[in-house]
Amino acid sequence: MSRLFSVSLYFVSFIPLWISVLFLDILSILDNTTSKMTEYISISCILVGMCISLVVIYYEIHRQGKEGSKIYTLKIAKEEKAITAEYLLSYILPLFAFNFTLWYQVVLFLVFFITLGYLCIKHNYYSINIALEIVGYRIYQCVLSNDDNVVIEQLVMSKQRLNALIGMEVHISALNNDYGLDVSKG
């Protein structure tokens, strides 16, 4: 996967935070007491970043085809349901400590956000992506085997209900060492 795709996945994974920041910034703009430059810059950056990221993610996921994937037989597929809540509690909730209407708080947030992003992208680490869940992807803990009967365990993102496809062949395209993308359907 491209570096731009990794950055886009990282940015979009914080969508609950961005929605909250947009809400707070809009409320701050409607309150006519102080300068609103921080809010206008914040809103602009979030909207531009979200638009670019969504286009990149859409293009990359739809560009993925069976030709670059590996064929596996699905042995076990268990849907991961708690992973989203864990992600929200671990990554998103602590960021609400920042006041996004004050420029110095935004700078502190950006230092933290960019450092975390750099480390996640450098180590090719993706956590659950809430935006992908919103558009119908689910995460499954899968046990897969290839033609040589080599068995692997992998987290797989899929729009299909993989737990209903046990024993069937699936086409998995690697996102990183931990996550694969099911590209079995056209």
Image (tube, rainbow, N blue to C red):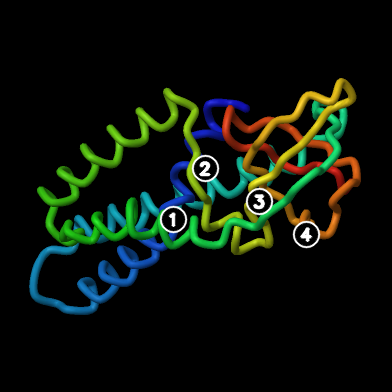
Question: In the visual, does 88 lie left or right of 176?
Answer: left
Q: Which residue is located at x 84 percent, y 51 percent? A: 166
> Which label's residue is closer to the chain start, 3 or 4?
3
Front residue of 15/90: it is 90
Query: In this figure, which residue is indicated by the disc labeled 1?
Result: 47
Query: SS class of the residue under badge 1?
Result: helix
Q: Which residue is located at x 19 percent, y 57 percent? A: 37
Query: In this figure, which residue is indicated by the disc labeled 4?
Result: 161
> Which label's residue is closer to the chain start, 1 or 3?
1
Spatial separation of the CA atoms under disc 2 and disc 4: 22 Å
Query: SS class of the residue under badge 2?
Result: helix
Question: What amino acid is found at the position of numbered circle 1 in the picture?
Answer: Leu
Q: Nearer the viewer, mark 1 or mark 3?
A: 3
> Which label's residue is closer to the chain start, 4 or 1?
1
Spatial separation of the CA atoms under disc 3 and disc 2: 18 Å
Spatial separation of the CA atoms under disc 4 and disc 1: 32 Å
Question: In the visual, does 61 lie left or right of 179?
Answer: right
User: Circles 1 and 2: CB distance less than 8 Å?
Assistant: no
Image coordinates of residue 76 in percent, x first then y, are 75, 48
| Residue 31 vertical position relative to residue 88 in the rendered view, above or below | below
Query: SS class of the residue under badge 3?
Result: strand
Q: Nearer the viewer, mark 1 or mark 2?
A: 2
Front residue of 142/32: it is 142
Spatial separation of the CA atoms under disc 1 and disc 3: 31 Å
Image coordinates of residue 186 in percent, x first then y, are 89, 46
Residue 9, label in figure: 2
Image coordinates of residue 115 in percent, x first then y, are 28, 32
| Residue 115 vertical position relative to residue 86 in the rendered view, above or below | above
